[in-house]
Structure formats: structure tokens, C-alpha cells
Image (cartoon, grey):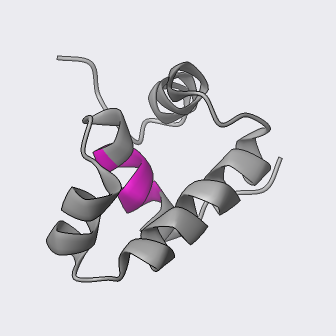
């Protein structure tokens, strides 16, 4: 499994926080297309595109903390 880039980790955290691609684009000041590319790259690297898989990966790799 490939390691996520810093930007991919930022995008992943916002996805898990239930932000839309438009919201992520605005927050990170990047294009929606770039957000979608990051989503695709994250899914490829972790082997799944489901929100559950994204969340599980983020918790396991301490990208997010449970509240």
C-alpha cells in the first residue's frame, strides 16, 4: 500500500468530515477537478473508494482522531 501525500491526507480528513468536493475545493483553494483527482488517487492507494474504507484508513493511520 502506497503512502498518501500530505495533500491527500488533508483531502481525506475533509472527506471523512463529510465535506463535499465543492467545499473541499473552497477550503483548500484548489479546483474541484483537483479534489476529484485526489479522491481517485486516495481510493487507488487504499484499494477502495467507500467512505467506510476512507474512514477506517484515516483512523488506522492517525489522520483523524475519534472524538
Residue at image location 45% in from the left, 26% down from the top: 59
Name the residue nearer the viewer: 64 or 43: 43
Counting the numbered discs, the total is: 0
Against 13, residue 39 (above or below) is below
In the rendered image, residue 1, in percent from the top left (x then y), is placed at: 83, 46
Front-most of 65 and 8? 8
Q: Which residues are magenta?
A: 9-14
Whole-percent x, y for residue 19 in the image:
24, 45
Q: Give the side of residue 10 with respect to residue 45, left or right.
A: left
Residue 12 location (% of width, % of height): 43, 49
Q: Vertically, is 34 above or below 35?
A: below
Residue 27 quadrant:
bottom left
Is residue 22 found left or right of 13 in the rendered image?
A: left
Quadrant, the C terminus: top left
Q: Position of residue 46 (x, y in %)?
A: 73, 41
Name which quarter of the figure residue 9 lies in. Answer: bottom left
Quadrant for residue 26, please give it.
bottom left
Residue 41 is covered by the magenta coloring: no
- Residue drawn 76% across the image and 51% down it: 45
Q: From the viewer's perspective, is 19 left or right of 1? A: left
Residue farthest to the bottom, as pictured: 30
Dominant secondary structure of the residues highlighted in magenta in the image: helix
Residue occupying image coordinates x 60% and y 25%: 53
With 63 as the anchor, is 30 left or right in this view?
Answer: left
Amino acid at each position: 500500500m502506497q503512502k498518501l501525500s500530505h495533500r491527500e491526507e488533508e483531502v481525506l480528513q475533509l472527506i471523512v468530515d463529510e465535506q463535499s468536493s465543492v467545499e473541499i475545493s473552497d477550503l483548500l483553494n484548489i479546483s474541484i477537478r483537483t479534489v476529484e483527482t485526489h479522491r481517485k488517487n486516495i481510493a487507488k492507494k487504499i484499494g477502495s473508494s467507500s467512505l467506510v474504507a476512507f474512514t477506517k484508513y484515516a483512523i488506522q493511520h492517525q489522520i483523524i482522531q475519534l472524538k
